[in-house]
């Protein structure tokens, strides 16, 4: 049996396989289907300081090999999370990581401060793909200045492991990765969803209420893989790779491209047991190739 443990900042993960924010609830929803304590970590739903209703329906559309979503960060807010959800999940034997979202630098700070008070949450994942309402709705994470501003502000108030989740809707993701590394991020995760659109030809209308939405699933995997590889060459902090992972082979590919750990998102909807199958598959792959530790895969792509 190969060693599967890896480190992200101060976090020691029992294995590199985690589940992605917005696709795995708070983890407990899946507890009847798989042993969720086998996971390296669970990234819980996007959490904002104030409750959010989310966008109007329809807010999902199926696409070839993927889906579009415009859920709009529906959640009951950080106070509700702290009072009602945290007590339910705090003793689960894996890392429970909160995805922190915001609409201004101040709301990111407030949310990060609130989550920092929760002892058993060892890390946050900062979702910088959110629109900055004070800057005409442009996402923080699509410019170096916007990304730096929010990461710098949150770093000052958040002492634990800070993972910054990058947007793929940029020309050069390595610039953004370098900018957030310079502001003190402990790790980056990539990719968030890609901006897309679906149209109903018969009705001559967009399918999503928001017109555009976020594309995810196997269709985005080649883009995500390329971005992980480019980012690996540009920064020193560990990368968490995600985007379209649906089996152990995909996970191996992301690690070869430079990811220290991975997340599985949309594919949980297709097969809710996929994450544990990926853990087993990684183990078998390492044994078959004579790797003593899964860490030997990180960035081991031969080019
Ligand atoms: C329904 C849905 C909701 C999502 N909600 C969030 C969220 O709240 N915060 C976030 O950072 N990413 C969110 N994402 C993005 C995923 O975490 C992930 O980055 C993306 O889907 C790519 O991975 P995948 O192809 O494995 O799904 C969501 C994705 C989906 C499909």
Image: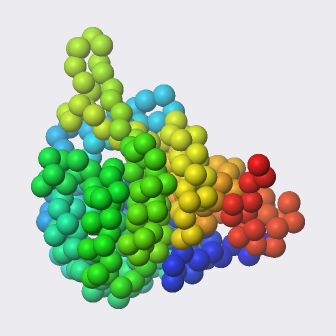
Q: Is residue 237 visible?
A: yes
Does 233 appear above or below 2? Answer: above
Q: Is residue 280 left or right of residue 204?
A: right
Residue 262 locus on image (x, y percent): 56, 60
How far from the left and from the top, in percent, is residue 251? 64, 55
Residue extending farthest to the top is 202
Residue 38 shown left or right of residue 145 in the figure: right
Q: Quadrant of residue 116?
A: bottom left
Foreground of the two, 70 or 145 = 145
Name above or below for residue 58 compared with residue 288.
above
Image x and y of residue 228, in percent:
56, 53
Residue found at x 32% / y 52%: 143
Specify whether 102 is left or right of 158. Answer: left
Picture quarter with the N terminus: bottom right
Residue at 59 percent across and 47 percent down: it is 225
- Which residue is at 26% across, 74% downward? 153
Query: Which residue sits at x=54%, y=49%?
Result: 227
Residue 272 versus residue 80 in the image, above or below: above
Q: In the picture provided, is 301 more to the left or to the right than 277? A: right
């Amino acid at each position: 049996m190969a060693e599967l443990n890896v480190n992200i900042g101060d976090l020691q993960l029992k294995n590199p396989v985690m589940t992605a924010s917005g696709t795995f609830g708070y983890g407990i929803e899946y507890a009847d289907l798989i042993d969720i304590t086998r996971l390296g970590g669970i990234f819980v739903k996007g959490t904002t300081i104030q409750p959010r209703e989310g966008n109007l329906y329809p807010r999902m559309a199926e696409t070839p090999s993927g889906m579009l979503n415009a859920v709009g960060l529906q959640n009951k807010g950080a106070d509700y999370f702290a009072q009602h959800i945290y007590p339910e999940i705090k003793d689960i034997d894996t890392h429970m990581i909160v995805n922190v979202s915001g609409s201004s630098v101040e709301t990111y700070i407030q949310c990060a401060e609130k989550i920092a008070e929760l002892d058993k949450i060892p890390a946050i994942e900062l979702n910088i793909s959110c629109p900055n309402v004070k800057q005409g709705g442009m996402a923080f994470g699509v410019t170096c200045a916007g990304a730096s501003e929010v990461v710098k502000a949150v770093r000052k108030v958040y002492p634990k492991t800070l993972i910054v989740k990058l947007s793929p809707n940029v020309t050069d993701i390595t610039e953004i990765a370098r900018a957030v590394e310079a502001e003190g991020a402990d790790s980056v995760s990539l990719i968030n969803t890609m901006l897309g659109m679906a149209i109903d030809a018969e009705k001559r209308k967009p399918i999503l209420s928001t017109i555009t939405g976020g594309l995810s699933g196997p269709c985005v995997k080649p883009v995500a893989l390329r971005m992980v590889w480019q980012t690996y060459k540009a920064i020193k902090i560990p990368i968490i790779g995600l985007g379209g992972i649906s089996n152990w082979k995909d996970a191996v590919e992301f690690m070869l491209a430079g990811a220290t750990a991975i997340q599985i998102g949309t594919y949980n909807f297709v097969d809710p047991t996929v994450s544990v199958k990926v853990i087993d598959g990684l183990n078998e792959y390492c044994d078959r190739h004579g790797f003593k530790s899964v860490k030997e895969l990180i960035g081991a792509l031969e080019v």
